[in-house]
Amino acid sequence: MFFLKNYTTLCVFVGLFFCRNISAFWYDSSDICNNLIYIDYCLICYNTNNVMYFLSQIPYYDRCDYIRIGHQRNVTKGEILKQEDEFMEKQSDVAKKRYKEYKDEHNFSKKLGRERLDSKVKHLSSDAQDLYKKIYAVVDNNDVTPFQEFQLCHTIINEAKFKAVVEASALLPSKFYPETYNGHFIFYENENPDECDDC
């Protein structure tokens, strides 16, 4: 009981002084930033593959501006990347350095993940390989918006042979993958479908 009481006190203390919730006063109720919580004053909390690695170096109320850029659905992916880079160019040298480290780590991880998937797709049928190629042709195209990407990939999966969809499903980004085939769709997001056990 003594431990539980002190542990609870410690959690409240840490929550009050080291965690922040972005104030909902500044944003409307549908804004993504209303639910943004991060740990302040923590040197080891964020590594280079966490967006807070560089956002923690940006002024408190400016962080949501960066996050909002990435959540645009009707702007091309290439334009989103450009806007993110332009936003970061206006930040401190430390934030810019960390942003570059984050992007390098992100791109490296993405490249390794794709190489893993490419090696696995070679063992699938030609229909499943074609489906994989069509999906990633859209995913790799920065001239489409995230909304167009979603629609195009959803259509590609919906029009593919069921057997090919089942066979390639572990290699496709799950955000495009329906829970039921040719019915009411519920989509799941997963950054790395190769490591998704329950998608």
Image: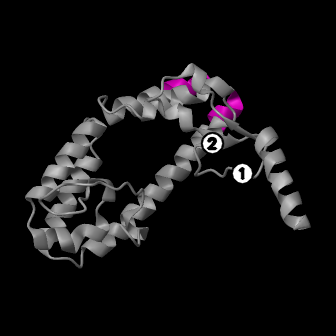
Is residue 138 found left or right of 54 in the rendered image?
left
Mark count: 2
Residue occupying the point 29% across, 29% down: 74
User: For the magenta stretch, what is the residue range?
Assistant: 86-98
Residue 152 sits above or below residue 115 on the image = above
Q: Relative to residue 59, is residue 125 depicted above or below?
A: below
Amino acid type of the residue tagged 2 in the rendering:
Met
Q: What residue is disc 2 on?
A: 52
Quickly name the residue at label 1: 45
Q: Is residue 92 magenta?
A: yes
Q: Residues within 10 Å of mark 1 (few under 14, many from 20)?
A: few
Classify residue 169 as left or right of residue 19: left
Disc on res. 84: none
- Identify which residue is drawn at 41% across, 68% down: 196
How far is disc 1 from disc 2 in space, using C-alphas? Answer: 9 Å
Neighbours of disc 2 within 10 Å: few (<14), some (14-19), many (20+): some
Of pointers 1 and 2, the one earlier in the residue sequence: 1
Residue drawn at point x = 70 percent, y = 37 percent: 20
Q: Amino acid at mark 1?
A: Cys
SS category of the residue bearing label 2: helix
Q: Residue at x 58, y 26 (%)?
A: 24
Quadrant in which the N terminus appears: bottom right
Q: Position of residue 60 (x, y in %)?
A: 67, 27
Q: Tag 1, which secondary structure? A: loop
Looking at the image, do the residues carrying marks 1 and 2 touch, with CB atoms under 8 Å apart?
yes
Furthest toward the right, the residue is: 2
Q: Nearer the viewer, residue 87 or 66?
A: 66
